[in-house]
Amino acid sequence: MMSGRDQEPSHYYVGIDVGTGSVRAALVDQRGLLLAFAEQPIKKWEPQFNHHEQSSEDIWAACCLVTKEVVQGIDAHRIRGLGFDATCSLVVLDKEFHPLPVNHEGDSSRNVIMWLDHRAVSQVHRINETKHRVLQYVGGVMSVEMQAPKLLWLKENLREICWDKAGHFFDLPDFLSWKATGVTARSLCSLVCKWTYSAEKGWDDSFWKMIGLEDLIDDNYSKIGNLVLLPGASLGIGLTPEAARELGLPSGIAVAASLIDAHAGGLGVIGADVRGHGLTCERQPVTSRLAVICGTSSCHMGISKDPVFVPGVWGPYFSAMVPGFWLNEGGQSVTGKLIDHMVQGHPAFPELQAKATARCQSIYAYLNGHLDLIKKAQPVGFLTVDLHVWPDFHGNRSPLADLTLKGMVTGLTLSQDLDDLAILYLATVQAIAFGTRFIIETMEAAGHSLSTLFLCGGLSKNPLFVQMHADITGMPVVLSQEVESVLVGAAILGACASGDFTSVQPGLLHSLVFSFWKLLSPVKTVSITKQLILQTFCVDFILVNKWECFKKRKQHRFFFSFCK
Ligand SMILES: Nc1ncnc2c1ncn2[C@@H]1O[C@H](COP(=O)(O)OP(=O)(O)O)[C@@H](O)[C@H]1O
Ligand SMILES: O=C(CO)[C@H](O)[C@H](O)COP(=O)(O)O
């Protein structure tokens, strides 16, 4: 273990994070400081409603561009390791590793079914009807966003142009590590969380037979992975000369087995050193912390020493994020995407854009300022006394685990002005925070004991989003000093693979604060204290009432099925 953040940097690590909307890279030194950052948008296609596709070539090209940018001017010999994280989208390649189409149009450049794709509704329904034992480890109900239903959809819908020709099905994080090293080993993180693999028992043949995908068992599961490594393990002999040329990195540097993006974010924040901020979690085990990674979606990552079975919450997954710990992953399929959708779809959006541009502000900074203005002396929560949003516009991932649920807004008027847009935005943010509270309460009812939230991801840059999560959950929210914590998580993988660090976390599993994380993830802000909750008592009262309504979501589900 290396010591001290005062030590001169001698080693660098590159982290690459592939989100839904963009690829980001960072150069991180051995003190955990982020020295350079670059971002590049990636292409997305929605050829049909609920079909979402990407291109693995386009994603790789973006990885190359951002990596070259962050290592510019750096002594390449000091770069010791590379780590990837990515969304858990499904990449399809033929036997020669060329892209295959995942669409009826036969367009092979679109060879990725994105994680938020909901095309496989009938397939997931049939998978869930089997009640197979592997379902116990995904919260009791498999999500349409996981890989088994998508594979079944490909077999049933694109047999000739895709399924029969396929040689390799990768989770996107594993595709990236293969592309960098030529090694087809899969990360335990991807296989356990999205593919029904068990860290203890491996693949379950009976599951694949029962759902009609027995052909995947052939050749010892060679198409979906038969060599499984812990995240951070070094792959083969490192970066191939071809990938090194494309990325602008030295050939042969260590490349790590990857993580899903939410898990990299969790790894980047959950062990932060909180000493000196008066937080109760300072004296509590790391299992009292909930990492919430908020981007296009939000993922709620809680760990435990023993498996906890939480209905409607994914997991328990062993060693999928922090080695030796079980992971439960709650989630909301659209959060950042929902806020963008509500704001961009409002008639006053062009006016908002113009006003924000005139002030050189982001639309969200402008909206937050506007809410401050219109609330006058009142707490901001009063603005949504009559307006309520139901956030399940893309189904409910957790804890209801019901993809058929829909979104709803109540309390609409004929107003179309900027005030109206700002209030709708606030109600949406609140609804998302209520969703988080719903997940937390469900996890606690099943045995978790949580006291503190650790937020990261694009939405954690929005002070209103952070504050609402604190107010509505009643928990302190900790933000890491390094806002790009997901990238820090990816760089931790590279640091581990290089051999400079022995593990993604030190051996002392029960220590309150992990020293490795202390090194990599210092705390900047404790955004709310109990005192602040008291100051906003009136808001709290309204939020409590809203919460009572929100909890009645099961009735909402009934309403929808009744109308069908
Ligand atoms: N500074 C910011 N203020 C408010 N919202 C932000 C900010 N930066 C990003 N976001 C929101 O975060 C979401 C994207 O987060 P990000 O982590 O980049 O997503 P992904 O990893 O899914 O690509 C978007 O909905 C975007 O509007
Ligand atoms: O299911 C996931 C994690 O387990 C998805 O990868 C994640 O929700 C998508 O990430 P993001 O919202 O950051 O793009």
Image (cartoon, helix red, strand yellow):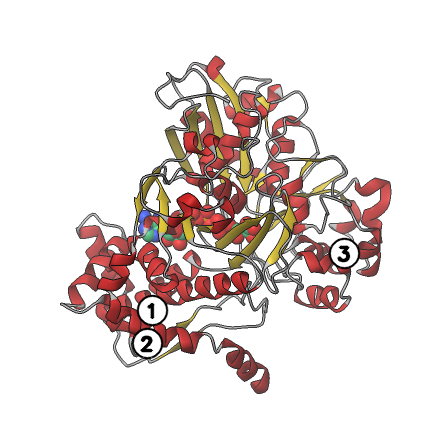
Measured from the top left, where is residue 355 in percent x and y? 19, 57
Which of pointers 1 and 3 indicates the residue nearer the eye?
1
Q: Residue furthest bottom?
A: 562
Tell me the tag on residue 387. 2
Measured from the top left, where is residue 463 in percent x and y? 29, 53
Q: Earlier in the sequence, mark 1 or mark 3?
A: 3
Measured from the top left, where is residue 68 in percent x and y? 45, 25
Which residue corresponds to mark 3?
155
Label 2 crowd (10 A; few <14 / some 14-19 / many >=20): some
Q: Element type at marker 1?
A: helix
Residue 162 visible in image: yes
CA separation in Å, label 1 and label 3: 42 Å
Q: Earlier in the sequence, mark 3 or mark 2?
A: 3
Identify which amino acid the numbered label 1 is placed on.
Ala
Q: Residue at x 37, y 59 (%)?
A: 469
Which of pointers 3 and 2 indicates the residue nearer the eye?
2
Which quadrant of the rendered structure holds the C terminus?
bottom right
Pointer 3 with pointer 2, Cβ within 8 A: no
Where 381 falls versus 515 (above or below)?
Answer: below
Q: Residue furthest front?
A: 283
Identify which amino acid the numbered label 2 is placed on.
Leu
